[in-house]
Image (tube, rainbow, N blue to C red):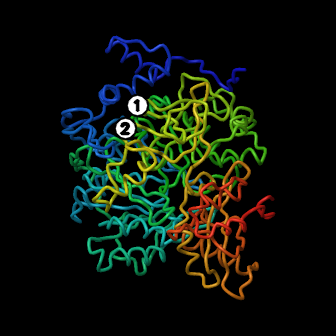
Amino acid sequence: MAEKALWTPVNHTTNLTQFQNVLEKKLGISFPDYVSFHKFSTDNTEVFWNEWLLESGFILRSKPSKTLERGSHFAKSKWFPGAFYNFAENLLERGDSQKEAIVFYAEDGTVQRLTFQKLKNEVIKLQNHLISLGVKKGDRVVGIVPNAPISTIGMLATTSLGAIWSSASPDFGVKGILDRFEQILPKVVLSVESYLFKGKKISIIQKLEEVTQALSSAKHSEFIQTIMYDFVEPEVDFGKIKNPIRYQELKTTEALEIQYTPIEFSDPVYIMFSSGTTGLPKCIVQGGGVLLNHTKELSLHCNLSSGEKLFYYTTCGWMMWNWSQSVLALGATLYQFDGNPFYPNWETLWSMAEKENIQVFGTSAKYLSVLEEEGISVKEKYLLPNLKVILSTGSPLPISGFQYVYEKINPKIQLSSISGGTDLNGCFALGNPSLPVFAGQIQCKGLGMDVQVFDDIGKSVVGEKGELVCPTPFPSMPLYFWNDESGNKYKSAYFETYDNIWCHGDFASITPENGLIIYGRSDATLNPGGVRIGTADIYSVVAKIPEIKDSVIIGQDYKDDVRVILFVVLSNGIQLDEVLIKKIKEQIKLETSPRHVPSLILTVPEIPYTVNGKKVEIAVKQTVAGIEVKNKNALANPNALDFFKNRKELMQ
């Protein structure tokens, strides 16, 4: 029996179908359906991406000598060699100067609006200051910033000079920030003094003192300055923050022209960070192909056009922040929000969406599940007549989540569950405005992305669960990893499972409707609330607690989400009482973030290790889930897994 669609498109003329028609006429071929169009885009990947480069209006300073220069290995392939462009120019010069580029809603209700011209003026001001500091192509500028206009201004000023931007959320702990930024040696830190969460002002001055002092130590001699942006209220005293200067006191330079430093597609623009599951977060370096892929996803798959409005609830520590910035390259308006989306109540984001006539609303599966659990009917209060797409990512959206959106939010919108990752700063699978929506499924594979599912022997399968892979290079693939001259870290991250084929680490299947179902990560990365976090951050904190001798951390699938479980081996004579549990949780929250705090802390007498001395988180996770561990021979102490079986605390 065929699956019944929750939604079917009414308007069959979309940005995607229009681009498809352009290619059909230009190339003299016909695509009877999306499956055939997608197959063309992957079988003829160079033709497809070159045509999108032209059709999207990407601003180039010089044309490429070819579309794709294939290397001896997937990872050595180069896109658009010979082409020069500027990342910031493509975002700042595509919109009407008098139209709104950014609208920001603060948690306290404050609204800030910047036209494309006002945004450019702010970028010029910061750009000129960065020039005065000697910032140039290839230098790193980092932000400890909220999802607010200052984050966009910082990124644009940095990339306008050909420098490299990286960011973290202000709620990160000191160690979480330094584990990332100490690896890339930034010249400048752009930060706020505090942020708002659940109605409270949370100062990060003390945190910044530690971070900037560490970044300016002898081994980090490149560090120059901390630029402080007054976000909540001005700070009189910046304490021991290294070389602070107040952003609001920078010279206003509205009369000056902006400078755009040309760079190649193989030059870095962003440094993204992995979750740090097994060690320090990997520094993933990305270039111009990210923007080209973003515009494809936003225009063709989200059906967003110039003059329309997109909102995505995110922080600057998540790749969806980078993704959302690219709406400016379409001449669309970016809506930003910082704070708790349920403060003072559930209406916060929906009130904004209706008042501002937002067309595309993005959030996490967890946010939707909370609304569902609370029994909230959004449609009873908000009609949302202009909303056409709801995007959901961060974790797989369960079938009940799909049903909730159509029953309680709006039955007429396209619900797009999307999936990709930090690694490609984009999506492998996402929505399609010309296809129906089926419960629990991602609508389609992304155009130009050769997405397949491989079984255990490396055979491409349909209707079976397996590893999500991509055998063909794509423009938003990482350029390289920072401090990985040999390329071994890069190759081991994606190409160890299948030779010269990108293995993404997602457990997935392709459905009879040609959609995808993602069942979760096939590695040990934690994903509570739809936000990926790494176990290494937690281990580094726990290791300093004297009462704990050893530990292992897993994510347990629980109520359509993932909860973090910390198992500890206690030092002799120590009992796991409420006082110790509180101490552990508070220390983890202080040094990492609230998202890292375990839902449960349980004791075990022993942690399983491989013969090579590595903790086996995946084996523990499988044991907790009641799945038989097949590789016990690789363990030095396989009987230790018995301590994780049938724990009554995990059944509740």
The answer to whether the residues at label 2 and label 1 have Cβ atoms under 8 Å apart is yes
Q: Nearer the viewer, residue 119 or 483?
A: 483
In the picture, residue 650 is in which quadrant? Answer: bottom right
Residue 389 at least partly seen: no
Neighbour tally class for label 2: few under 14, some 14-19, many 20 plus, Cα within 10 Å: many
175, above or below 288, in the image: below
Q: Judge whether 405 appears above or below 107 on screen.
A: above
> Residue drawn at (71%, 85%), measured in percent from left and top?
574
Point out the tag, 2 or 1, that comes first from the N-terminus. Answer: 1
Structural crowding at the residue carrying mark 1, measured as other residues with C-alpha within 10 Å and reported as few (<14), some (14–19) or many (≥20): many
Q: x, y percentage for residue 287? A: 32, 47
| Three-letter residue code for mark 2 | Phe
The image position of residue 276, as x and y in percent, is 48, 62
Relative to 1, 549 lies left or right? left
Helix, strand or loop at disc 2?
loop
Pick out the residue farthest to the bottom: 573
Residue 623: name its quadrant: bottom right
| Residue 429 placement, left or right of 124 | right
Residue 379 place in picture, x, y as percent: 72, 35
Q: Which residue is mark 2?
A: 474
Number of labels in the image equals 2
The residue that mark 1 highlights is 448
Above or below 422: residue 46: above
Q: Residue at x 59, y 32 (%)?
A: 387
SS label for mark 1:
loop
Residue type, mark 1 in image: Gly
Q: Quadrant of residue 571?
A: bottom right
Between 374 and 583, the one lying in front of the other is 583
In-front residue for pair 647/189:
647
